[in-house]
Amino acid sequence: MPETPTAASEAPARPPCVLCFNASDPSGAGGLAADQTAIASASCHVLPVATCVWLRDTRHLHGHYALEADWIDDQARAVLEDVSVAAIKVGFAGSPAGLAAIGAILSDYDELPVVTYLPELAWWTDGEREAYLEACEALVLPQTDVLVGNHHTLARWLLPDWDDERPPGPRDIARAAAVHGVPYTLVTGQARGERIDNHLASPEVVLAHAEFERIDATFIGAGDTLSAALTALLAHGSELSQAGAEALGYLDQALANGFQPGMGHAVPDRLFWADDDSADAPDESSPSP
């Protein structure tokens, strides 16, 4: 893997194509639905590979059905043997077996930049969650260029024995991720009073930083939105720090323009830039190649 991820050495098709492993989400809040709209917003073509099917609405996650590993492998290899891919995003794989299938594909296409997003898994039993995280550590993280996740989720996973009075910072989490082979982490959602801190960091340095105003709403799909936008920008060949800053700016605007499609949580408006009121003056925070 390159020290700073960029697009594949071969010139990508226009628009660049991004392979996404993620869940099918009927609420449209996260999963492949989030990947498709966020990546299309950055002028990329999405190659969606379903790993599982969520049973959820905007209020609750009721369950999920994980696809067999062979189904995941067959979907991905069918398009990889046909289409020039510029970057890969790994979202929720559905099961440890799904992670194993994805890990084998990443190994075969190790020239491509890989962004891995870890969602919150508190809804699973302890045993299911631990098995999934162990598989992720062994099979996917060593092939990941940028790990994306909420501060609390990543800290609980990567630094379970943290005993300092202060919470771990982004470089602390980056150092813990680096033990598993990840050179960069994008840590979101660290509360600072009325502000929310977000950092793209390596163990040595913070490459990008953004503060969001706290919004009086609970969102679903924010992490998928951010990681998808980052992957698309890397597919265009953007330098990592620039891609991180642009992806964070895009997420900020998507959250600020978020909406409540049902009776539950809010959803980022990943197409905020297409609103009629802003058609004549595109927002500079939208992702651009």
Image (cartoon, grey):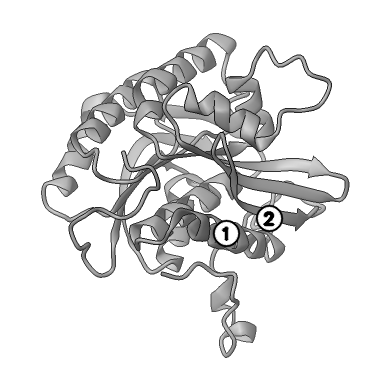
Percent x, y of residue 70: 21, 27
* Residue shown at 53% from the left, 9% from the top: 127
Residue at the extreme front of the image, as rendered: 204
Q: Position of residue 114 (x, y in %)?
A: 36, 42
Task: Classify 10 Å Cα crowding around label 1: few (below 14), some (14-19), many (20 and above).
Answer: many
Q: Please give left or right for residue 275 compared with residue 102 in the image.
A: right
The numbered disc on residue 150 is: none
Residue assigned mark 2: 210
In the rendered structure, the answer to whether residue 148 lies left or right of residue 23 reads: right
Disc 1 vs disc 2: Cβ atoms closer than 8 Å? yes
Q: Which amino acid does the dot numbered 1 rest on? A: Ala
Residue furthest out toward the top? 127
Let me know if residue 220 appears in the view: no
Q: Is residue 109 above or below residue 44?
A: above
Residue 135 quadrant: top left
Q: Is residue 253 above or below residue 76?
A: below
Residue drawn at (23%, 27%), measured in percent from left and top? 104
Location of the N terminus (image quadrant): top left
**Type of amino acid under label 2:** Ala
The residue tagged with tag 2: helix, strand or loop?
strand
Q: Which residue is mark 1?
A: 245
Does label 1 or label 2 sit earlier along the sequence? Answer: 2
Helix, strand or loop status at disc 1: helix
Label 2: how many residues lie within 10 Å, few (<14), some (14-19) or many (20+)?
Answer: some
255 on left or right of 13? right
Q: In the image, residue 69 lies at what x, y percent?
A: 26, 25
Q: Residue furthest bottom?
A: 280
Residue farthest to the right, as pictured: 193
Q: Residue at x 76, y 48 (%)?
A: 196
When the figure is inspected, residue 216 is found, relative to residue 110, above or below; the finding is below
